Amino acid sequence: MIQKIIKRIGVLTSGGDAPGMNAAVRAVVRTGIDKGWEVFGIKHGYEGLINGEYVPMNRRSVSNIIQLGGTMLGSARCPEFKTVKGRSKALRALNQNDINALVVIGGNGSQAGAHAFSEIGFPVVGVASTIDNDLYGTDITIGVDTALDVALEAVDRLKVTASSHQRAFLVEVMGRNCGYLALMIGLAGGAEYVVIPEVETDPDELAAGLMSAYERGKSHALVVVAEGATYNAEKMAAFFEQHKDRLGFALRVTKLGHVQRGGTPNAFDRILATRLAAGATDCLARGEFGVLVGLLRSEVSTTPLSEVVTKKKPLDLKLLKLAEVLAK
Ligand code: ADP
Ligand code: F6P
């Protein structure tokens, strides 16, 4: 019954771009066309959805993009979509263009938008994509693995110079309010300390720990800090500056910032994006709406958006303990 209704679908990318979004767009376009539908690329996330920026796509429209970072559709943060009025405008624009289903590729906020839109009865399916890996309903999101690779390369380089000069380095990584990126980079980069929003860190204890690592014969020290931690790079640097005479050493600070988002998607992210996006058009075809497509225990799986927006994915804090043990 519902399968017959779907003829024209839209696909958009929203929120922070993530490496692999293009592979996801490509897979939505080609699997959608394979199902006999017309597919429209919606420019600039929810902003384009509201303003009717819909571009007809064919198989060739997505040629040669699987290897590219960023998103060929463009992305945006759109405050207007958070309002009922904004979403009503979007619904009107979709109806005017006869588009009757939507795939939303994005992170936490974008899926909150997808949920709100599906609540008004429009068929929506989400695809889990953010470098933060903070989405409930998927073990891993599109883009994290590449972001980790990019950050790790920088961390490895910092360790080289840190050990030449017997210095302590602090690296701040992204992740908004989630410590996943920092924890994984800390583990993979062999950090002495990982500072995340989920666990309070006393900067005095951290300084003592770094000093003790030096006394145990370590030639360098690396601290990985999540941007969302209470003591992020700025606050930690200010603390060390304020207490430099007492602490006896300085921290060199590097903030990786958006460089983590701009990487070329690695094989894992391309394959993940392809599988999840194909899973999204399968959902639409079988009439399963209002869900997020993610990867759970290595299987493409769906979770109701109502759960995705209300539940929090826990961070595995056993790994933080492991990082501490390995740093000794
Ligand atoms: P991400 O998807 O990467 O987490 P944001 O949190 O910035 O990025 O969200 C992207 C966009 O999703 C926002 O700019 C807004 O348009 C939409 N959005 C976020 N939260 C909501 C919400 N509660 N209701 C409706 N739309 C939302
Ligand atoms: O959600 C992805 C992310 O890169 C977060 O890690 C970060 O906090 C945020 O986006 C940065 O947003 P913007 O690109 O708008 O500065």
Image (spheres, rainbow, N blue to C red):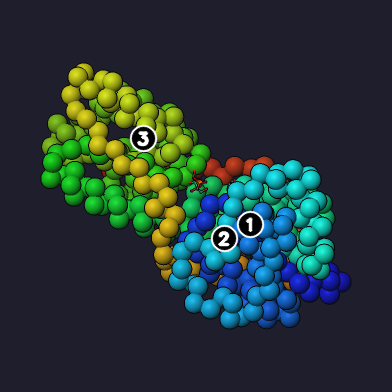
Q: Nearer the viewer, residue 16 or 182?
A: 16
Q: Residue at x 72, y 57 (%)?
A: 51
Q: Which residue is mark 3?
A: 233
Confirm if mark 1 falls within 8 A of ligand 1: yes
Q: Secondary structure at mark 3?
A: helix
**Cα distance, mark 1 to mark 3?**
31 Å
The reply to whether the C-beta atoms of the residues labelled 2 and 1 are less than 8 Å apart is yes
Q: Residues within 10 Å of mark 2 (few under 14, many from 20)?
A: some
- Asked if 167 appears above or below 34 in the picture, the reply is above
Q: Nearer the viewer, residue 94 or 201?
A: 94
Q: Nearer the viewer, mark 1 or mark 3?
A: 1
- Looking at the image, residue 39 sits to the left or right of residue 195; the answer is right
Q: Residue at x 37, y 28 (%)?
A: 235
- Looking at the image, residue 190 sits to the left or right of residue 113; the answer is left
How far across and down, in percent of the image, does residue 145 sit?
43, 58
Q: Which residue is mark 2?
A: 74
Outermost residue on the top side: it is 246
Q: Residue at x 63, y 71 (%)?
A: 28
How far across and down, in percent of the image, does residue 164 sit?
12, 45
Name the kind of residue labelled 1 in the image: Gly
Name the kind of residue labelled 3 in the image: Ala
Q: Nearer the viewer, residue 131 or 241?
A: 241
- Looking at the image, residue 249 sits to the left or right of residue 326; the answer is left
**Cα distance, mark 3 to mark 2?**
30 Å
Q: Earlier in the sequence, mark 1 or mark 3?
A: 1
Does residue 228 appear in the picture of this structure?
A: yes
Q: Which residue is mark 1?
A: 45
Name the kind of residue labelled 2 in the image: Gly
Does residue 323 appear in the picture of this structure?
A: no
Q: Nearer the viewer, mark 3 or mark 2?
A: 2
Q: Secondary structure at mark 1?
A: helix
Confirm if mark 3 falls within 8 A of ligand 2: no
